[in-house]
Amino acid sequence: NLFFESIVKEDRSLLNFIDADYTFVNEALAKHYGIDGIVGPEFQRVTVDPNERGGLLGQASVLTVTSLPTRTSPVIRGLWVLENMLDSAPPPPPPDVPPLDDAKVEATATLRQKLEAHRANPSCASCHDRMDPLGFGLENYDAIGAWRAEDNKQPVDSSGVLPDGQTFAGPGELKQVLLARKTDFTRCLT
């Protein structure tokens, strides 16, 4: 990966994995990200807004593998952040915990509203209260990492409240939360 290689070869801070102001794109990926002026199949380094595309959490590769085939997954994304950026994986779910039951929530509900109904079960809430807010911070990205402002024809709510009461709104502020916990992040990488 060119991004990883650039951090190593340029002796950049490990914190660039969270908030780098650049990424690498070819023409197809640039179009996907909404970046103009890139032509051809070769990957080129481009400057990006670190609040939107910088670091691993803005890369379509990470956002796609932390989604389900047809929609985003704040749960999977939040778990990925806990495990890979905060070295704080929750325990595995108990065997009797039911999956998210979409039928119990209105069809027009956002994914956030559906997950809130799931967290009403106390056995689910113990882990989901830690995972889901981190994943909600990435809801401005669709299942394949394209930026979006709506989910199910409603505005995306990418805010979160962590168990310690810290709040954030959107991927940029989520990255600031992660940077503030840099000790956990750097321990995870070493």
Image (cartoon, helix red, strand yellow):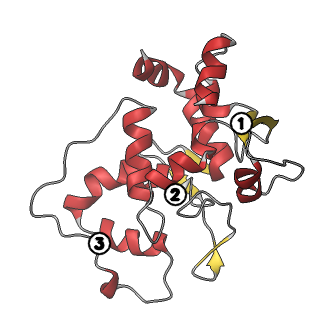
- The tag earlier along the polypeptide, 1 or 2, is 1
In the picture, the disc for residue 64 is: none
Amino acid type, callout 1: Thr
- The tag earlier along the polypeptide, 2 or 3, is 3
In the picture, residue 157 is in which quadrant? bottom right
Point out residue 63 in the picture as x, y percentages from the top left corner. 53, 52
Q: Residue at x 45, y 41 (%)?
A: 81
Q: How far apart are the alpha carbons under marks 2 and 3? A: 16 Å
Count residues near mark 3 (Cα–Cα under 10 Å), then give few for <14, some for 14-19, many for 20+. Answer: few
- Please identify the quadrant where the N terminus is shown: top right
In the picture, the disc for residue 100 is: 3
Q: Residue at x 51, y 77 (%)?
A: 110
Count residues near mark 2 (Cα–Cα under 10 Å), then give few for <14, some for 14-19, many for 20+. Answer: many
Mark 1 or mark 2: which is in front?
Answer: 1
Amino acid type, callout 2: Phe
Mark 1 or mark 3: which is in front?
Answer: 1
- The tag earlier along the polypeptide, 1 or 3, is 1
In the picture, the disc for residue 23 is: 1
Secondary structure state at the residue bearing disc 3? loop
Q: Residue at x 59, y 29 (%)?
A: 17
Residue 136 as seen in the image, left or right of residue 6: left
- Please identify the quadrant where the C terminus is shown: top left
Point out residue 99 in the picture as x, y percentages from the top left corner. 23, 69
Q: How far apart are the alpha carbons under marks 1 and 2? A: 23 Å
Point out residue 74 in the picture as x, y percentages from the top left corner. 45, 58
In the picture, the disc for residue 136 is: 2
Amino acid type, callout 3: Leu
Q: Nearer the viewer, residue 85 or 126?
A: 85
In the image, residue 31 above or below residue 78: below
Q: How far apart are the alpha carbons under marks 1 and 3? A: 35 Å
Secondary structure state at the residue bearing disc 2? helix
